[in-house]
Image (tube, rainbow, N blue to C red):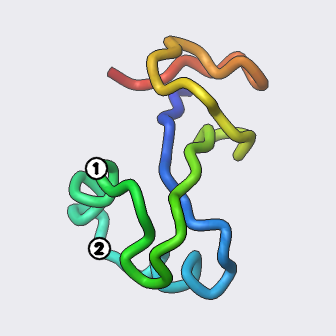
């Protein structure tokens, strides 16, 4: 199974709104630095284990060992 680094807003209300975005919108949100809902800086996490990532250049998640796509 492959994972990907994903950007999220730590605000729970924003996370609910983000879940409603169409899948094809995710290519645009990957470029965001700030949340378009609350303007907080977005955080990067592993899509598999949900642990925070400090580097998006990793080939594997340092927390769960899952290989990243691409």
Identify the residue under disc 1: 31
- Of marks 1 and 2, the one in the foreground: 1
x then y, percent, for residue 69: 40, 25
Q: Is residue 63 above or below residue 58?
A: below
x then y, percent, for residue 42: 52, 58
Left or right of residue 31, residue 58 in this image: right
Left or right of residue 40, residue 12 in this image: right
**Residue neighbourhood size for the residue with mark 1, other residues' Cα within 10 Å, grouped as few (<14), some (14–19), many (≥20):** few
In percent of the image, x 48 and y 26: which residue is there?
A: 56
The secondary structure type at the circle numbered 1 is loop
Q: Which of the two labelled residues, at mark 1 and mark 2, occupies the earlier sequence position?
A: 2
Give me the C-alpha separation between circle 1 and circle 2.
16 Å
Image quadrant where one finds the N terminus: top right
The secondary structure type at the circle numbered 2 is loop
Q: Is residue 6 above or below residue 1?
A: below
Residue contact at pointers 1 and 2, CB within 8 angstroms? no
Q: Which mark is residue 42?
A: none
Left or right of residue 52, residue 67 in this image: left
Image quadrant where one finds the C terminus: top left
Residue 22 lies in quadrant: bottom left
Identify the residue under disc 2: 22
Looking at the image, which residue sits at the far top? 59
Residue 10 lies in quadrant: bottom right
């Amino acid at each position: 199974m492959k994972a990907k680094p994903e950007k999220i807003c730590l605000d729970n209300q924003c996370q609910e709104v983000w879940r409603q975005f169409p899948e094809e919108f995710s290519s645009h949100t990957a470029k965001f630095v700030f949340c378009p809902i609350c303007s907080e800086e977005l955080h990067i996490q592993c899509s598999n284990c949900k642990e925070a990532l400090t580097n998006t250049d990793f080939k594997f998640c340092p927390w769960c060992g899952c290989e990243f796509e691409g």
